[in-house]
């Protein structure tokens, strides 16, 4: 049996090192995304046990002066999963400040190798290494 790699907080921190925030060289795209990305992380939860299945998690922490946001899965293949940071429909405006969006699912197919986060039509973050937690 494999031993725990690290606490979840350390995995999230390691994912930050493996991600790169996109350059804001397109002013129009940057203004279309009213959030400032603070942290992104992705990991596979492979905790053992009866009926255990791998769960895939993506977390985006951000600062925003506007509405609440959610992660919506967009197109992408098995190797790359793409998510849009989109305004949460029918949500009351959130208080300005730090917030976050989460995505979690049971994996039925192959594990993705890469995660792309978009906002306002532009790539705002990429995760090129996805850790496993046991």
Image (cartoon, rainbow, N blue to C red):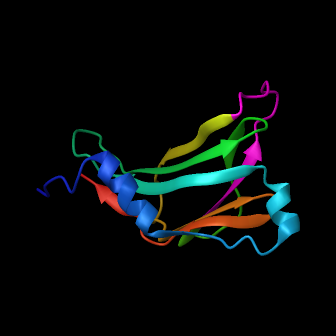
Name the one closer to the observer, 61 or 78. 61
From the viewer's perspective, tell me whether residue 18 is left or right of residue 40. Answer: left
Question: Which of the image's four quarters has the N terminus?
Answer: bottom left
From the viewer's perspective, tell me whether residue 97 is left or right of residue 15. Answer: right
From the viewer's perspective, tell me whether residue 89 is left or right of residue 50. Answer: right
Give the image location of residue 38, x and y in percent: 56, 52
From the viewer's perspective, tell me whether residue 64 is left or right of residue 106. Answer: right
Which residue is located at x 78 percent, y 49 percent?
Answer: 34
Vertical comparison of 57 with 75: above or below: above
Which residue is located at x 42 percent, y 70 percent?
Answer: 129
- The residue range painted magenta reads 81-96
Which residue is located at x 37 percent, y 51 percent?
Answer: 54
Give the image location of residue 36, x and y in percent: 67, 52
Does the stretch in magenta take in 94? yes
Give the image location of residue 100, x and y in percent: 59, 40
Which residue is located at x 46 percent, y 53 percent?
Answer: 107
Give the image location of residue 119, x and y in percent: 74, 57
Does the stretch in magenta take in 110? no
Name the one closer to the observer, 94 or 118. 94
Q: Residue furthest right?
A: 28
Residue 99: quadrant of the picture: top right
Q: How many marks?
A: 0
């Amino acid at each position: 049996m494999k031993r725990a790699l690290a606490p979840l907080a350390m995995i999230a921190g390691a994912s930050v090192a493996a991600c790169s925030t996109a350059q804001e060289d397109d002013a129009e795209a940057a203004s279309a995304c009213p959030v400032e990305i603070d942290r992104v992380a992705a990991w596979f939860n492979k905790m053992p046990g009866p009926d255990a299945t791998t769960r895939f998690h993506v977390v985006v922490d951000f600062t925003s002066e506007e509405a609440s946001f959610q992660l919506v899965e967009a197109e992408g293949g098995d190797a790359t999963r793409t998510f849009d940071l989109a305004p949460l429909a029918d949500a009351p405006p959130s208080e300005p400040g730090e917030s976050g969006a989460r995505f979690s699912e049971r994996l039925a197919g192959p594990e993705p190798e890469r995660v792309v986060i978009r906002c306002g039509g532009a790539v705002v973050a990429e995760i090129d290494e996805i850790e496993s937690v046991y």
